[in-house]
Image: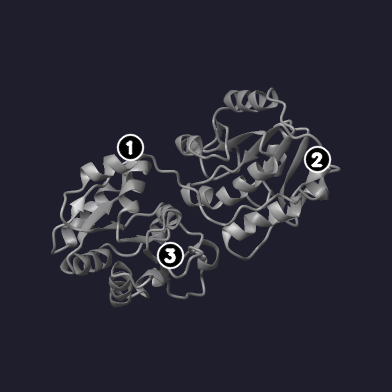
Amino acid sequence: MNATASRLGPVRRIVVFRALMLGDMLCATPVLRAVRATWPQARITLVGLPWAASWAQRLASVDAFEAFPGWPGLPETPPAPARQLLAFLNGLREQRFDLAIQLHGSGVRVNPLVARFGAARNAGFAGRTAWIPPGEAERFALWPEEGHEIQRLLRLADHLGLERRGTEIDWALRPRDLACARRLLPAGRSHVVVHAGAQLPSRRWGVRRFAAVADRLAQAGLRVVLTGTQGERELVASVASAMREPALNLCARTDLWTLGGLLSSARLLLCNDTGLSHVAAALGTPSVVVACGSDTRRWAPLDTRRHRVLWHDMPCRPCGHRNCPVGHGCASGVSVDSVTHAALAMANGANT
């Protein structure tokens, strides 16, 4: 612990705010480990979106979880009624945190919110126009505009003098997860996971393109397992219908942990640039990621030997649109042949 962290004095209760989706949360695990390593005896509470409750329960770096009910101006979830928001803030204030850490982003919208948690001291990121609580500027790092998300977040750890504990992503599987995955898989062949969904349509490669690559993987003797969420059933069914070879459609039949079990024993994950690619990175499963619209420098897996990201440059990248308004050239520019070549190579151990 350096001088900056030591000047915080006794830290027994910490609250960390990061209320985002799967990939964003996984990229924060190295910073959470650094917080735990610096204050091993502290009780660390994570405030996140409700979906993350079961995930947080498995993190050795987190002791408690508080579901974030949303807030005006934040796009991740509609805000709850005012009475519920007030109850949420009062519940946090009653815990009398010694330190609140803002890991959500630049702080332009959320620094005033995190200050309302009532912690004795605040720390986090601040963009050039972000508000910082009076007298606490020393504990706020300038929000990085470039670089990988893991490295961006670790800049706060360095700024505060926290003890780094690597850049690996945490994903804690249990024996039950592996057993559930095995029960879904017929014996006899190695499998690959094909995940054609993504939260935003602008981030999705074409259905027929996924189907064409999946057919080639099946023709190479691999069992193709199609996965997705409940809301992606129609999309995944379209991939299955477009395929000429048989596939095992497990869309909406797994939770995150069984899906992790499927990935842990897979020869390959083929997907869009979405949260599941970070799960594969955590598990060490080789992947081929088609990145449509996203900032690959920020979100591509750090291990470039085990994970290959294919993307087509466009002047409008990175894209902030839900649906592409200009023809989706970032998707059509990634050819089936290039993805097929990468997928077959990685499935056959080209990463070793």
Q: Residue type at mark 1: give it.
A: Arg
**On screen, 142 above or below 121?**
below
Whole-percent x, y for residue 200 in the image: 42, 54
Pointer 2: residues within 10 angstroms few (<14), some, or many (20+)?
some
**Dots 1, 3 in contact, CB < 8 A:** no
Q: Quadrant of residue 45?
A: top right
Q: Residue type at mark 2: give it.
A: Leu
Q: Quadrant of the C terminus?
A: bottom left
Q: Nearer the viewer, residue 344 or 21?
A: 344
Dot 2 or dot 3, earlier in sequence? 2
Q: Nearer the viewer, residue 85 or 272?
A: 272
- Mark 1 — residue? 176
**On screen, 157 above or below 245?**
above
Between circles 2 and 3, the one closer to the viewer is: 2
Q: Alpha-carbon distance for marks 1 and 2?
A: 41 Å
| Res. 8 mark | 2
- Mark 3 — residue? 325
Dot 1 or dot 2, earlier in sequence? 2
Dot 1 or dot 3, earlier in sequence? 1
Pointer 1: residues within 10 angstroms few (<14), some, or many (20+)?
few
Q: Alpha-carbon distance for marks 1 and 3?
A: 44 Å
Whole-percent x, y for residue 203 in the image: 41, 60
Whole-percent x, y for residue 125 in the image: 70, 51
Whole-percent x, y for residue 16 in the image: 64, 39
Element assignment for label 3: loop
